[in-house]
Image (cartoon, helix red, strand yellow):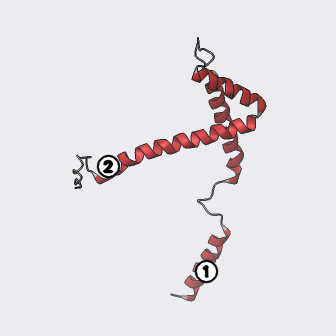
Amino acid sequence: MSEASRSGLQALRALRTQLPDPSAPLRALEPIRQLCAQIRLEHRIAESLQAVPVQAGPLNSQGVVVRTLNRLQQTSPAYLAALVRQMDTWATLQALMEAAPEAARQASGKRPGPRAPRPRGP
């Protein structure tokens, strides 16, 4: 390799270390992401607060949950936001866990078959 190509290669490596990581999230988009997350959160809360059954009795579980969410919204909106985020995370994880066996089956190309009988003990 010639001296000129080595120096050019070194210059490119030096330039590459000065550039930001292309896989890193853009800092300029962070306020927009936060705003979108806040709008989604407010929409989820409003949606759940409107889901009151028409003639729910005082012990109707859905009515109790809606009244509790209303009270929590008035008392501590930040706690309600954290609770809703946590529940969304749980729902996402549950959906991923349910999809995992199906994805593994499709990747292997096998169909779930009958299980082998277990040996019986004495």
| Left or right: 1, with 119 as reference point | right
Label 2, on which residue? 105
| Residue at the image point whose x is 63% and y is 55% from the top | 25
| Residue at the image point whose x is 68% and y is 70% from the top | 18
Depth check, front residue: 31 or 93: 93
Residue flagged by tag 2: what amino acid is it? Answer: Arg
Depth check, front residue: 51 or 31: 51
Q: Quadrant of the C terminus?
A: bottom left
- Residue mark closest to the camera, 2 vs 1: 2
| Left or right: 87, with 70 as reference point | left
State the image coordinates of residue 68 (x, y, percent, origin top left): 68, 27
Numbered tag placed on residue 10 in the rendering: 1
- Label 2, label 1: how far apart the Cα atoms are: 48 Å
Mark 2: secondary structure: helix
Is 27 situated above or below 98? below
Considering every residue shown, the one lying at the far right of the view is 75
| Left or right: 98, with 105 as reference point | right
Considering every residue shown, the one lying at the far top of the view is 55
| Residue at the image point whose x is 57% and y is 84% from the top | 6
| Residue at the image point whose x is 53% and y is 40% from the top | 91
Counting residues from the N terminus, which is met first, the one under dot 2 or under dot 1?
1
Mark 1: secondary structure: helix
